[in-house]
Amino acid sequence: MNKIYSVIWSHVKQCYVVTSELAKADGRTSIGGRTSRLAVAALTAFILTAGVTSVGLAAAPATDANIHYYSIKLTQESAEGNDSNYNNDGARGEGSIAIGPFVSAKGNHSLALGYRAETTHLEGGNDQDDNTAVGYRSQAGYRSTALGYNSKATGWYDVALGTDALAEQNNSTAVGMNAQATGKQATALGSLAKANGESATAVGEGASALSDYSSAVGLGALVDTGASKGTALGYQAKVLTGAENSMALGASSQVSGANSIAIGTGATVSVENSVALGQGSVASGNLNDYNVMSLTIPNLGSWYSVSGGYPDGIVSVGNNVGNNVGNKKTVRTITNVAAGRVTSDSTDAVNGSELYAVATEAAKHATVKAAANSRITVDNKSVNKGLGIEYTIDLNTAGLAKSTDGLTFAGDDGQLDNSKVISRELNKQLNIIGGAIDPVDANNIGVVKKDDNTLNIRLAKNITGLTSLQATTVISGTVTVDGQKNVITGLSNTTWDKTKNYLTSTKAATEAQIQKAMEQVAADANDTHIKAGDYAVGTITDKDGKSVQGVSMDVVDKTGTVSTVRITDVAKASDVGDVTSLNADIKNATGKTTVVDAVNHVDNKVGNLDYSSTKYVTKGESVTTSIGKLDEAIKNASEAADKHTIVSTEDSNLSVKNIAKEGEAANYQISLNKNLNVDSVTAANKITTKDLEVTGSATIGKVTINKDNKGTIGGLTNKTWDAKNITSGQAATEDQLQAATKNAVNYDGDESKTVTLREDTTIKNVANTTIEQASTNAVNAGTVYNETRVEKDGIFIRKDNTAGQNITALDHQLAANTESIYNINNRVSNLDNRINKVGAGAAALAALHPLDFNPDDKWDFAVGYGNYRNANSVAFGAFYRPNEDTMFSLGTNFGNGENMFNAGISFKIGKGNSYAGISKAQLVAENQQLKANDARQDQEIQELKKALEELKSRIK
């Protein structure tokens, strides 16, 4: 017996009964025994959920043809016992449905349909409910759907559709035979498709997306493990291990380098950050092989450095390597390239027109051509396009020097010592170095050819045109300019009289004068100050009305009245002169010659007539008179001794005198005049003189006097100011003046209305006032305190805090509020995206509709698509109608992460009619049968009428 049963309506029992297909033809006899009880028990739960009353399996009256083609065929395996659903106990979850042998609907509100179908449930919770499992050994987790043989949707919100389909992690979808979506939020569509990575997508037969966030679309497309965010699109397109963020587009395209793209059939990339564009294009190799830091011009040796020497990747539009199976190199032309920037550091691509311009310009210059005598000439007129002619240069090398022969140079020390000789090749530089770096144009140095064919460098005897003279120390009288310490000492102008006018004085001020001036400033009103401007040493009028040398400064008091402060007895740099030019025999023993010392030395050299016997000059005479007498005596002596040796001088600074006594041999004495007129004076150590005048500038150590003829002294090192520790008579610097006046109360310029206070100045007794717009009144600290404090504590501000502290607190709270609003915006944005996805899912579910009822085909399936704003979704639905009055429906959407599921039962309540369970096909067949019956009956009636007429005729 095949144990196949049918469910029919029993008029006798007024209920559905299960009958064997091998029973009597009328099918109305109830079957007893163990087998019938199993079939009845298996259908009880299903019939109850189809709107049939539970008492005695009774329902509204119907014909035997209400239910057809519904049967359960048992296997040889025992269908009784625990977990067999034999006793209608497979639906264990609240509101669940279990149909079939060994079916288990453990989840609340779940549906398990098919042999060993199972919906799971977690004891003590509801996180495994609302699931659907349809098919042999299908399994479904929380709110998941498994449809098909051995399909499994074990995670939350999963969909597994197809034989052996597996959706393992949450929010995953697997559609197709043996499709596997084992990654979280993964999607696998197609036979043998695999989406193992998180949020991975595999579409197509055998497509595999094995890394997180990867996509593989196409037959056999592959994104291998370790290639996250990779994309393979096309037949057998592959993104291999290690190729993160890479893309392979095209049949058999392949990428194995990270951050790379292969576009085109068979395109291959094996280098990171690279692109292969076009069919068969290959981007491969070692990036170090592509490093180009310089460019060398062949045959010329010209060398240029280039930019972009270390490439990050390769862009290939072909393949420069053929193989042994007939494949040739592949090259492509890149056209429509914009003109690039041609600079030393440009990395732009250039087009053909730019190269044409370079070649055209290069051809305009040098060319090599063969003359009639086969010799080579070079000019810049004709163009040689390089026809492959080989030229031989025929030169007469006799008399030609090699470039390595060069020249030799020798100084004084190289005349006898060859090791001192310097050799230089042609075009090599020889540096002749002296001490000066400024231009030399005063004709003080000359180069003279000697008879031995050498050049002699000489210094002129008379040095002219000097603008400055450097010396270590200059002493003029009591004034010493120390070039080592960079100070001037010995100045006598140490007094200060504020009533004097020092405006025209050009003397350097001493620290003593500055101290006294500052003491006077402090004694005056707090806002008395020195008027801004430049002050120099010059001629001024002293308190007695005499013209003296000094410095005059304007002082402005608090009322704006300008008075004059004069500093007298200030020496100018020109007063000192260039003492380093004094002769050595005039300098004193120490070498630190002052002007006074120099004059005294001259006086000592001249001597004193008090202790000398004179013949031609008289004591008390002027030097001029004495020189006149001496000149006359020399003249007379010359005339008397014209037969003797003549000793004379052309130098007006020298005098010659025969001091021999009468009868003695001539004894000529050469004397130096007291007043000298020379172009220059060179001293080894020092020059001592009374008055020294320098018309230009003088440099003593680091001190420069009258630089650029501005009447100033620069280079002094005494820049700091300590009023308690001064050096009397030492010249002060502007830095000391600035430091000394820094803490004074000053008006900021003559026209300024602002006052600059000394550091740490406190203004007291400022009247109370209010802070108002456009107010120009001074405000005291109390008013500021009251105006910047709040009356009482708030949520974020405190009355004891300053305005800045309260503003900071409000700023922090505002920042926190801004961050919270930002987070809310993000959540709203995420919610908006989810709403869009839910809307798309709802639209897709709404597209699911069943067809008209057909008792011969009670299962209907529908697929729907939905879109809402930027979200898309696909829905799948199944409808089962056991009869005209009842319909079960299942629907789910997938594809956007917001999966939804619906299940429903629709039924009619009322009397109904006898045709409720008849399909259109049955109605058509029955109608045809009725028409045939009518035709047959019409024919029979006609025959009966004819027979009746015959009977009537016989009766007559």
Image: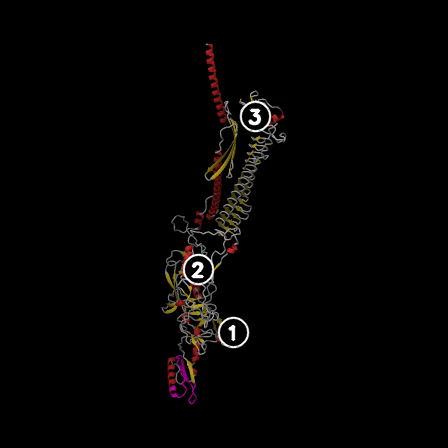
On the question of residue 722 being in view, the answer is no
Q: Are marks 1 and 3 in contact (CB under 8 Å)?
A: no
Earlier-in-chain disc, 1 versus 3:
3
Callout 2: SS: loop
Residue 658 in the magenta stretch? The answer is yes
State the residue in front, 635 or 481.
635
Residue highlighted by disc 1: 419
Residue 222: percent from the left, percent from the top?
53, 44
Which segment did they paint magenta? 638-667
Task: Give percent across and percent down for residue 186.
Answer: 53, 41
Q: Would you place residue 142 above or below residue 297 in this image?
A: above
Please give left or right for residue 2 compared with residue 653 in the image. Answer: right
Q: Looking at the rendered structure, which numbered label has been put on residue 742?
A: 2
Query: From the viewer's perspective, is the residue at label 2 or at label 1 nearer?
Result: 1
Residue furthest out toward the bottom = 663
Q: Position of residue 460 (x, y in %)?
A: 42, 75
The numbered dot on residue 276 is none
Under circle 1, the secondary element is helix
Q: Which residue is mark 3?
A: 7
Amino acid tagged 2: Lys
Q: Label 3 amino acid?
A: Val
